[in-house]
Amino acid sequence: MITADYHLHSSFSADSDTPMEEMVKGGIQAGLTHMCFTEHNDFDYPVSESSPAGFWDLNPDAYLYDFLKLREKYADQITLCFGVELGMQPHLSRKNAAFAKEHDYDFIIGSSHICNGKDPYQLSFYEGRTQEEAYLEYFGSILDNLKVYSNFDIYGHLDYVVRYGPDKDKGYSYEAYRDIFDRILEQLISMEKGIEINTAGLAKGMREPNPCIGVIKRYRELGGEIITTGSDAHVPAQIAYAFDRAADILKDCGFKYYTTYEKRSPSFPIL
């Protein structure tokens, strides 16, 4: 049984309108013992009509102010942790490093939402090439990020791109991208960084979570030990989505535990 959700968003993230307190109440109702908010911060997100400059920049002071009030208010019902999801791009390494040091986060997710100036969420990312070429470019950008930035705890939804490709996960598997995935996983392990099992893909109708089961299994085979559990919820109804299935997947992949963080220090609750 998994009772900790370590990938959550509220109205402090640009893509959620849900007040943080409503998310906390939803987590309590879902039976969680731990919730970690991981609000988005994506510097240099491509400017558009729907995303003006700075739209994805987090206000960490306002976020922390509300968080501390709620942590105290609900202290006897649930443990709340203060996290952030940093959007990584190679040229942002120094800016992200400075941002991460400004506050005492419990947990930092490093994520790739932008690849070479484009978000795979947009159809334009796939235009004029095959889906495989687009996926390979995205996975290659993760390696580029890992070469220049290390102040994070786990890398989020490693195959985020698969949520939005023209054919999504049709024909997709770890084996189809084995070479690049092994390089990513070996680099993460050498850096003593983890991955997550992110169930948002399941909520979107995909067959498997992000990353896919083959990647999780391979991470474990290579000696990876750190894996957090996250719903990537933006509304209360998504909190802890399919965590029963996530627990079964982790066990099938060789894990006897999952990972939580407080003050950037991992703990390993038994499944």
Image (tube, rainbow, N blue to C red):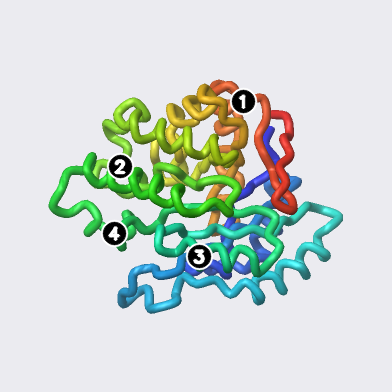
Q: Quadrant of the N terminus?
A: top right
Compute the Cα span from label 2 to label 3. 33 Å
Tell me the kind of residue under disc 2.
Answer: Lys
Q: CA distance from mark 3 to mark 1?
A: 34 Å
Closer to the chain start, of discs 3 and 1, is 3
For label 4, the residue is 122
The residue to which callout 1 is attached is 255
> Is label 2 in contact with label 1 (beta carbons under 8 Å)?
no
Give the quadrant of the C terminus: top right
First in sequence: mark 2 vs mark 3: 3
Q: Which mark is residue 168?
A: 2
Amino acid carrying label 3: it is Arg
Placement of 88 over or under 265, stated as above or below: below
Q: CA distance from mark 2 to mark 1?
A: 27 Å
Q: Tell me which residue sits at (46%, 29%) in the image.
A: 213
* 119 relative to 99, above or below: above
Q: What residue do we see at 47% from left, 33% from top?
A: 186
Residues under numbered marks 2 and 3 in contact, where contact means CB atoms less than 8 Å apart: no
Residues at badges 4 and 1 in contact (C-beta under 8 Å)? no
Total numbered labels placed on residues in the image: 4
Indicate which disc residue 94 carries.
Answer: 3
